[in-house]
Image: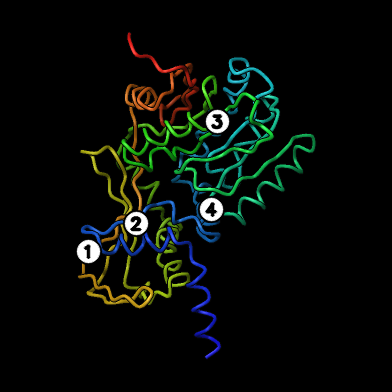
Amino acid sequence: MLKQEIEDGQASLADPSFRHDVLRGFEMRPRAIPARWFYDRRGSELFEAITDLPEYYPTRTETAILQACCGEIAAIAGAGRAVVEFGSGSSTKTPILLQAVDPAAYVPIDISGDFLRESSSLLAAAFPGLTVLPLEADFMKPIALPLQIAATPKLGFFPGSTIGNMVPHSSVDLLRAMKASLGEGAMLVIGMDRIKDPAVLEAAYDDAQGVTAAFNLNLLERINRELDGTIPIATFRHRAIWNDDRSRIEMHLEALADVAFGIEGRPFAMAAGETIHTENSHKYGPRDARMLLRAGGWTPVAEWTDPAGLFAVILAEAQPARTAP
């Protein structure tokens, strides 16, 4: 009796948007759930573990680029801006930027509140003179930034190639929302993963240790925990597939056998071989990346990459909209 009351209480506290997206995602054909729901506490911890894997080149490559280019970013952007990071995670790359640009404040934004507060505390301790204003929010939606930085020029920070997780029209919508939040005259430092050998990409998203598989399967664990799900986790496996036509890695959860389960009392069934599409990671060539930014209202100002051309860091500016050439 007590166990059932606890489970009912957990279900009632579930994020309504999470519930909506999961139920809708299982009703869709093909099934799909937005990747932002990976990042509960366990998911955030698993992703941090992924970034240290030998196959996962983006984090170490982008970090090296930032170490080399942040001095130039500081010279172009100027001192005294408020750094606003979209999807801050553990902020492992952020100190590199903050040390270089002499910011007026730092606003980390993340959907995982506990993870955000812990990482913000660590960063505040590392930069004792810096005003740190953590903001728990879904950056895919319009954001009201703290009043303390209303009159301060902004420098957005969006590392990690997170822009690649969205289909292009959603990426453009997000870039436009960022421009609206940060204001004209703001600048944006953004990471974008480059197109490369599919074998390198598939290994990066399906590592030998199985950490990415655990990260993907944790979404089902979260559904069971927060939405009173009865999904048999062992009946699903992680798959990473290169879709050349759409220039993206796709992550799926594939049913290994016919399976039936419930979510908040609603019955669902999947046949063997059916999948739940959980993530995209689009890869961009140099011209593609610049065109995407311009479509979102940002004018590229400078660009840096590694010697092998695996990854790019771009600095862009939110200039006034043009109605003529």
- Residue under numbered circle 3: 156
Task: Give how far apart the Cα atoms at labels 4 and 1 are.
Answer: 28 Å
Q: Which residue is located at x 53 percent, y 39 percent?
A: 86
> Residue drawn 23% across and 70% down?
270
Q: Quadrant of the C terminus?
A: top left
Camera-near label (4 vs 3) is 3
**Earlier sequence position, callout 1 versus callout 3:** 3
On residue 274, the disc is 1
Q: Earlier in the sequence, mark 1 or mark 2?
A: 2
Mark 1, mark 2: which one is toward the viewer? 2
Secondary structure of residue under mark 1: loop
Tell me what residue is drawn at x 50 percent, y 22 percent.
Answer: 315
Residue holding disc 2 = 33
Task: Give the foreground label among 1 and 3.
Answer: 3
- Neighbour class for label 1 at 10 Å: few (<14), some, many (≥20)? some
For marks 4 and 1, the one nearer the N-term is 4
Q: Mark 4–mark 1 contact, CB under 8 Å?
A: no
Residue 261 spot, x, y in % from top left = 31, 76
Q: CA distance from mark 2 to mark 3?
A: 27 Å
Q: Secondary structure at mark 4?
A: helix
Of tags 2 and 4, which is closer to the observer?
A: 2
Give the alpha-carbon distance from disc 1 to disc 2, as whole Å: 14 Å
Type of amino acid under label 1: Glu
- The residue lying toward the viewer, choosing from 99 and 12, is 12
Where does the image place residue 77, in percent across and percent down from the top left?
60, 18
Query: Callout 3: 10 Å neighbours few (<14), some, many (20+)?
Result: many
Distance between the alpha carbons at the discs numbered 1 and 3? 39 Å
Q: Earlier in the sequence, mark 2 or mark 4?
A: 2
Q: Residue furthest right?
A: 129
Q: Which mark is residue 213?
A: none
Label 4, on which residue? Answer: 49
